[in-house]
Image (tube, rainbow, N blue to C red):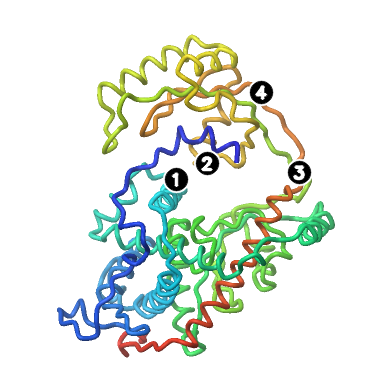
Amino acid sequence: MKQTQILSAALALAAFPLAPATVRAAMPAATLGAEGSDSASIAAVVNGQVITNQDVSNRAGLLALSIGMPRSPEVLGRLRPQVTTQLIDQMLELQEINQRNVTVADSDVEAAIAHIQQSNGLPPGGLRARLAAAGISFSTLVAQLRTEIGWQTVLHQVLGPGLQPTQGDINAEKAALKAELGSTQYHISEIFVPVTDPADDASARNFANTVIGQLRSGAAFPIVAAQFSQAPSALQGGNLGYVQLSQLDPAVAAIVQTMPVGAISNPVRVPGGYDIVQMQGSHKFGLAQQTILSVRQAFARFPTPITNGQVGPAQAAVIEKLAQSANAAHSCPAITALDASLGNVHPADPGPVNLATVTPPVFQTLLAQLPIGQASRPLVESDGASVVMICSRTNEAEPLPSDQEISNIIIERRVALESQQLLDELRHRSIITQDSSTTQG
């Protein structure tokens, strides 16, 4: 998307030391005959691969930290049943990932981590520091993200050519959207808690209620969703964007119509489990106004990248010189000329920018408040700094989604359905045993 070309100034990915690109290292597995401490004892065995009690404790600790709960033995004990179920499902996913020789690029994991940080106002490296301060291994989160990304690749492979919508599919979706012009769209986020066995229903509901209690006390929804939701939207912090009621499960659709902005639902029983929904806002589809910005940017590369978040003298000199040059630029053509003098590392004109889609929120606020024709302060990232200038702001009627956006909606819907079906199939043909203590809520 064009607007992302100017967002790099505010995102600054950290260089996380990740596990090797292959997904095989994503989850520790012991052999059945392994000896070890109680922490390495067996919580579950999935097709001969072991999930240890330490694995469960690490994930439960990560969840407790995410939702602001004390990591006491009593709290962790309450979380164990659902966490164990989640780890079993992820082991099944991991085995299928490995069976298909799927690998996940470090850059994909870095992007997912950056998205979580940006959604919660954390600086580069902030999530890692937060986990370290709580005594939780960063590799626990990295392993989960790597498995989630690999699983999405598996689903795309399974669906194959049938994943791509035909023009007829797109036209039908477009006709349905046109029929809903003027109807209310809801911007929601979700956390999906699966129920893999009817006997686990009470445990899953208790788990969902525990999460909801903490979310209502201020826990960050995107972090919890990214780590523990079992929906494809988890990699986006649970964010579904604006959706029509017809795109939602009927039980969810009935609830969101009554929810005020910021509200978090009670557990909603849907096929396959429970949904937790947060209301972000609403608007009239096709009638809303959007702010479109014409922007110019100038980027100055550092002689060496910033490391460990510390700006050295060489980087500081580049930032100071850029600030001086920007202060002398009083028009968009001047910013274009400045960018050219710096080597056109990034295009001076990134194209029209929809203010509503700009992330992170701090950068959206900067662009919303920046006067036309005034250069911003330098925006620092790992390899350089940039300044931006607003050339114009216009309010336009929100258009219908493009064919590509409609295609993406259909693809996401098909992937979500296939995920549930494939996981059910893997469970049915697998040999899974659990220690009885992990099934007690």
**265 or 227: nearer the eye?**
227
What SS does tag 1 mark?
Answer: helix
- How far apart marks 3 and 2 lie (CA) works out to 20 Å
| Three-letter amino acid code of the residue under disc 2 | Thr
- In the drawing, does residue 337 fall left or right of residue 324? right
Q: How many marks?
A: 4
Q: Amino acid at mark 4?
A: Ser
SS under mark 2: loop
Crowding at mark 4 (Cα within 10 Å: few <14, some 14-19, many 20+): few
Mark 3 neighbour class, 10 Å CA radius: few under 14, some 14 to 19, many 20 or more: few
Which of the labelled discs sits on residue 392, or is there none? 4
Residue at 56% x, 79% y: name it. 272
Quarter occupied by the N terminus:
top right
Residue 202: x, y in percent? 47, 84
Pick the front one: 157 or 373: 157
Residue that label 3 marks = 399
Give yes or no for contact between labels 3 and 2 (Cβ–Cβ under 8 Å): no
Residue at the spot of label 1: 118
Work out whether 191 lies above or below 406: below
Percent across and percent down for residue 174 are: 79, 55
Residue highlighted by disc 2: 359
Marks 3 and 1, how far apart in space? Answer: 27 Å
Q: Residue at point 32% right, 80% down?
A: 49
- Are the residues tagged 4 and 2 within 8 Å (C-beta)? no
Distance CA(mark 4)–CA(mark 2) = 19 Å
Q: Are marks 2 and 1 in contact (CB under 8 Å)?
A: yes
Mark 4 residue element = strand
Residue 45: x and y in percent read 33, 84
Q: Is residue 116 visible?
A: yes
Q: Is residue 260 above or below residue 206?
A: above
* Cα separation between marks 1 and 4: 26 Å
Callout 3, which amino acid? Pro
